[in-house]
């Protein structure tokens, strides 16, 4: 009974931690958007996106723009435990509708090990194919970005006492 109560409290604290990660304020920069969170044991200290390159692409007698964009999420782990973090990013219009997002399977990815008391950056690039003559031009409708972040405590190898990446835990041989 006592262990069940402790487990419930820990699950509640974990849910509160994840909820606090989502409470970010916005700072706008020209074609970049950045978010900062300022309290909690695991902090997103910076996140944002930037348009990197536009390439014209002709296919099926239509003209498309291949827009390469980059994103990053910087996470600070001020807790006493190592964690694995993995993330992705979406670009949204002013009403919060998703215009494009990273195409990564975040649940099946190892992620970045963030040791206790350190910070690490998760980042990537994505391509977005947009019809050149769309009105309004879809890329100009981007008003903000939003990240997805998954946190997981690593399992510990009993022999070496070192963290085991999430993708290697509970896998059949």
Image (cartoon, helix red, strand yellow):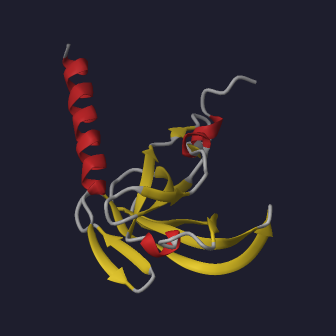
Q: Answer whether residue 114 is visible to the viewer in this image.
A: no
Pinpoint residue 58: horizontal percent, then vertical percent. Answer: 79, 71
Image quarter in which the C terminus is found: top right
Tally the marks: 0
171 versus 31 height, above or below: above
- Residue 91, horizontal then vertical, whole percent: 46, 63
Image position of 108 (left or right of 146):
right
Left or right of 109 on screen, residue 42: left
Name the residue nearer the viewer: 129 or 79: 129
Foreground of the two, 51 or 163: 51
**Which quarter of the picture shows residue 123?**
bottom right
Q: Position of residue 2 (x, y in %)?
A: 19, 18
Answer whether residue 50 is visible to the viewer in this image: yes
Q: Who's the residue at 55% across and 78% down the image?
A: 51
Q: Quadrant of residue 164?
A: top right
Rendered location of residue 98, percent (x, y): 44, 56
Residue 7 located left or right of residue 54: left
Instruction: Check the image and name the residue furthest to the bottom.
Output: 30
- Determine the residue positioned at 41% across, 86% down: 30
Relative to 7, say whether 38 is above or below. below
Classify the position of the N terminus by image quarter.
Answer: top left
User: For this rendering, which residue is in front, 151 or 65?
Assistant: 65
Quarter-of-image position of residue 129: bottom right
Residue in view at x 73 percent, y 77 percent: 56
Q: Is 99 placed above or below 134 here?
A: above
Which residue is at the far top? 1
Q: Residue at x 33, y 80 (%)?
A: 28
Q: Is residue 82 left or right of residue 170?
A: left
């Amino acid at each position: 009974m006592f262990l069940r109560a402790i487990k419930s409290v820990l699950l509640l604290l974990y849910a509160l931690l994840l909820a606090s990660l989502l409470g970010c304020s916005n700072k706008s920069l020209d074609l970049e958007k950045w978010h900062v969170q300022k309290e909690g044991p695991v902090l997103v200290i910076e996140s944002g996106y930037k348009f990197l390159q536009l390439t014209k692409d002709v296919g099926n007698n239509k003209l498309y723009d291949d827009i390469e964009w980059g994103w990053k999420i910087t996470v600070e782990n001020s807790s006493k435990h190592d964690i694995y973090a993995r993330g992705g990013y979406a670009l949204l219009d002013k009403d919060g509708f998703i215009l494009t997002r990273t195409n990564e399977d975040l649940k099946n990815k190892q992620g970045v090990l963030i040791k206790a008391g350190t910070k690490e950056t998760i980042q990537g690039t994505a391509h977005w194919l947009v019809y050149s003559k769309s009105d309004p031009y879809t890329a100009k409708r981007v008003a903000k970005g939003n990240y997805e972040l998954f946190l997981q405590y690593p399992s510990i190898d009993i022999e070496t006492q070192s963290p085991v990446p999430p993708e290697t835990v509970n896998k059949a041989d």
